[in-house]
Image: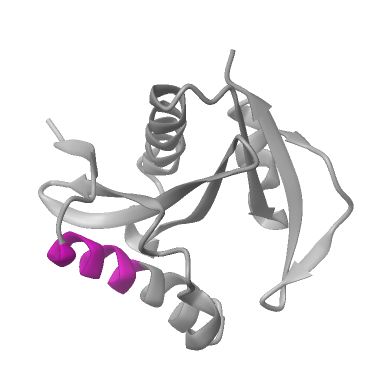
Amino acid sequence: MISVEALRVTSQEELDEAFNIRKAVFVEEQGVPLEDEFDEHEAHAEHILVYFEGQAVGTGRMRVVDDIAKLERICLLAPYRKYGLGKLIIKTLEQLASEKGLTKTKLHGQTHAEGFYHKLGYETKSPVFMEDGIPHVLMVKNLV
């Protein structure tokens, strides 16, 4: 039986693990400039880590923007993208939003992942736009 869990980041060590995963995926794999990946919202966002067999392999964060939960920086290390862990990241972030009494989420999804988000109940609400040199769309979901 494979051990998988998603946990809220509660220490600097865990936050460093999340940052290392983001650096591997967004900076090294997708070519996002390092200075664009980390921003002024890190300290105020709620971060999660997804563990596979005890190893941190995925992350995401949630911020409250205009009474809407904004899901951001969602990523998984390449070898772990076939286990349904992306869905676990989204569901965990949505649960954090619900715990705060929020009823709506939004995210900027990379266009190659648009179908993935549609399966989880998200609707595309914008034309394609570029963010860090990567095509994205605005996607939203009502949690209630």
User: Residue 16 location in percent, x, y?
Assistant: 23, 70
Among the 4 quarters of the image, the one containing residue 1: top left
Which residue is nearer to you in this view: 101 or 15?
A: 101
Considering depth in this image, is 134 or 115 the residue closer to the camera? Answer: 134
Left or right: 44 as drawn, with respect to 142: left
Q: Picture coordinates of residue 3 (x, y %)?
A: 14, 36
Q: Can residue 3 be seen in this view?
A: yes
- Residue 57 vertical position relative to residue 98 in the rendered view, above or below: below
Residue shown at the point (68%, 40%) measured from the top left: 115
Q: Does the magenta stretch include residue 92?
A: no
| 19 over 93 or under it: above or below | below
Count of all numbered marks drawn on residues in the image: 0
Left or right: 31, with 82 as reference point: right
Nearer the observer, 39 or 110: 39
**Magenta part, dominant SS:** helix
Q: Give the range drawn in magenta.
A: 12-21
Pick the front one: 44 or 79: 44
- Pick the quarter of the image with the C terminus: top right
**x, y (%) of residue 68?**
61, 36
The residue furthest top is 144
Q: In which quarter of the image is residue 83?
A: top left
Tell me: 123 left or right of 116.
right
| Residue drawn at 55 percent across, 76 percent down | 30
